[in-house]
Image: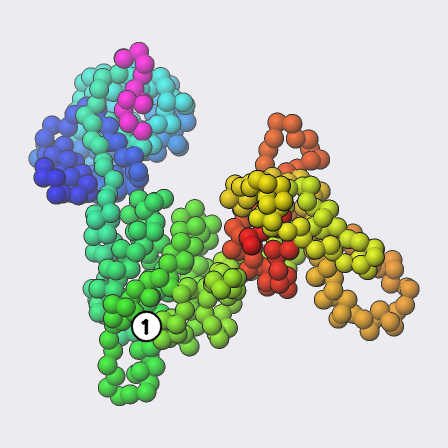
């Protein structure tokens, strides 16, 4: 076949060639990236061939999942049951084996082969058995490999076994060499150009309405959008079905500012000039929505979030126009607009995005994330100096310990900053202590300012109530830490020497996000809490 053909075309031609000629007794389809295409193509061809017939006569087929067949008897029963149902539906008379007597043919391989012969002779048809994810048989049913590879020889009927797996045949074949080598069909993954062509062809050509995201006039812009999506996602993902799933979620959001602009023009004029963005505007629009595509990859590919929920949370309001987009640099930074799913913070003159799943956290959870970031990037010996309090300063925290450069000059040598080495682990008690220190200085000040009048009225009767509130808050902090671990914002680290009461964690958020959260919580200078902050 020509090299210009894609893997989907080559796969179609390979299956059609097998269908047109005498079917080999054993075929192995190696699909290392995704077995979904192989499954869809084989099922479509088998259904079409069984209904229309083929050049070599009629045939019956069975499609099984290797995960469901965890015992040999279940494997035999599922095959015979499906074949009998097809045989009975194609014939006016009852099949050669009553369904109530089917179990007696599943005790061993010889009875199973005898049942296959009866069904094939009764229906005068060949049999095709397709097994998906057959790599599971290597652990659950290793004794079936040799009989499966020689099943047509043992049954002496027109029969073929087709296996589909992510693993190659050289990883699955028995070590004793008792199984015959199959006809191998290797399904190569799509390259970027093939994936881009496939996704662009999915764009519908019909026009539902002028303000539809799938207006045919958007197809050139859609091509650029798909190219950007592939460049971002193919580092981690090459399955074009999953890429199409992510594209279907991001495209309506991507084109929404243009639709809002068109809607405004249609309201203001009877004959509006609806044009697409020029090259400069398209580049700005792509740069603006790049964080959205990365966020969609994180949330939709592992199915952490449903696509409808993702679109609902990230959809832009109707008062966000293309002109607003061209003045900002990220979807998470829209100035002078109230968007609940985005937030904007600046640090050092740079835009700092806060992802929506972090923005939706509670206030205590945000304090815990900031404290976890400090615990992961500060050595434990610096906690007393950075978070300790002095009685002669009325309980105020002692200000930070300088920068890496100043300490390095005083010692005569320089060290690599911890922010470049990555986060370190920290125990639970250290995290709770840092959280308490930060909340006491910032969270408690805000709350005390709001409750000064109520404290004056109640007097000393609130002492016990404050103690109870401290205990409840500590329990809330511990529960929130568990939730953050489940969300992947904190990593719980297992150690061989770790005891049950000494849990260790590691923070997964980066410095940009930590500074943005700190500014949101009123911590104007997070550098004062960092041991090796940038100068």
Query: What type of secondary structure mainly makes up the magenta span?
Result: loop
Report if residue 269 is visible in the image.
Answer: yes
Q: Nearer the viewer, residue 464 or 114?
A: 464
Can you give x and y, in whole percent of width and height, for residue 94 in the image? Answer: 26, 33
Whole-percent x, y for residue 417 in the image? 55, 44
Q: Position of residue 321 (x, y in %)?
A: 37, 75
Q: Residue at x 34, y 81 (%)?
A: 264
Identify the residue position indicated by label 1 in the image: 258
* Secondary structure under the numbered disc 1 in the rendered image: helix
Q: Is residue 32 above or below residue 262?
A: above
Q: Nearer the viewer, residue 444 or 309?
A: 444
Name which quarter of the figure residue 171 lies in. Answer: top left
- Give the position of the C terminus as an image quadrant: bottom right
Q: Quadrant of residue 98?
A: top left
Residue at image x 64%, y 55%? 528
Is residue 129 found left or right of 463 in the rendered image?
left
Magenta stretch?
A: 167-178
Residue 196 position, x and y percent, is: 23, 52
């Amino acid at each position: 076949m020509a090299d210009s053909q894609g893997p989907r075309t080559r796969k179609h031609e390979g299956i059609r060639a097998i269908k047109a000629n005498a079917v080999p007794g054993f075929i192995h389809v190696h699909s290392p990236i995704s077995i979904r295409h192989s499954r869809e193509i084989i099922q479509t061809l088998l259904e079409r061939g069984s209904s229309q017939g083929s050049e070599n006569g009629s045939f019956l087929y069975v499609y099984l999942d290797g995960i469901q067949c965890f015992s040999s008897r279940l494997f035999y029963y599922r095959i015979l049951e499906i074949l009998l149902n097809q045989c009975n539906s194609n014939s006016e008379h009852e099949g050669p084996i009553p369904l109530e007597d089917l179990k007696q043919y599943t005790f061993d391989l010889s009875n199973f082969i005898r049942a296959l012969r009866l069904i094939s002779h009764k229906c005068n048809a060949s049999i095709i058995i397709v097994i998906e994810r057959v790599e599971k048989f290597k652990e659950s049913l290793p004794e079936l490999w040799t009989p499966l590879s020689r099943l047509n020889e043992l049954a002496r009927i027109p029969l073929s076994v087709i296996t589909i797996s992510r693993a190659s045949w050289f990883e699955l074949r028995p070590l004793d060499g008792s199984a015959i080598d199959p006809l191998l069909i290797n399904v190569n993954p799509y390259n970027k150009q093939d994936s881009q062509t496939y996704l662009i062809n999915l764009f519908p050509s019909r026009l539902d309405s002028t303000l539809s995201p799938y207006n045919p006039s958007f197809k050139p812009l859609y091509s650029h959008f798909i190219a950007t999506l592939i460049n971002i996602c193919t580092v981690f993902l090459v399955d074009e079905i999953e890429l199409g799933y992510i594209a279907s979620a991001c495209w309506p959001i991507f084109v929404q500012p243009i639709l809002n602009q068109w809607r405004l023009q249609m309201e203001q004029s009877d004959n509006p000039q609806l044009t697409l963005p020029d090259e400069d505007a398209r580049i700005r629009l792509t740069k603006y929505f790049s964080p959205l595509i990365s966020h969609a990859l994180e949330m939709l590919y592992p199915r952490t979030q449903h696509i409808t929920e993702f679109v609902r949370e990230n959809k832009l309001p109707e008062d966000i126009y293309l002109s607003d987009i061209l003045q900002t640099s990220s979807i998470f930074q829209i100035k002078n607009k109230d968007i609940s799913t985005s937030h904007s913070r600046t640090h050092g003159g740079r835009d700092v995005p806060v992802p929506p799943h972090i923005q939706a956290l509670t206030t205590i959870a945000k304090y815990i994330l900031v404290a976890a970031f400090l615990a992961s990037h500060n050595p434990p010996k610096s906690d007393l100096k950075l978070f300790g309090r002095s009685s002669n300063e009325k309980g105020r925290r002692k200000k930070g310990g300088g920068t890496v450069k100043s300490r390095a000059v005083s010692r005569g040598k320089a060290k690599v900053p911890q922010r470049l080495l990555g986060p370190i682990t920290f125990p639970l008690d250290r995290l709770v202590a840092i959280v308490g220190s930060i909340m006491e200085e910032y969270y408690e000040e805000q709350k005390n300012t709001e409750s000064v009048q109520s404290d004056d009225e109640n007097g000393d009767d609130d002492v016990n109530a404050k103690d109870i509130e401290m205990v409840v808050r500590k329990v809330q902090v511990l529960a929130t830490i568990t939730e953050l671990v489940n969300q992947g914002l904190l990593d719980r680290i297992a150690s061989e020497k770790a005891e049950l009461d000494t849990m260790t964690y590691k923070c997964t958020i980066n410095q940009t996000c930590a500074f943005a959260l700190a500014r949101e919580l009123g911590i104007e200078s997070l550098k004062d809490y960092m041991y090796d902050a940038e100068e």
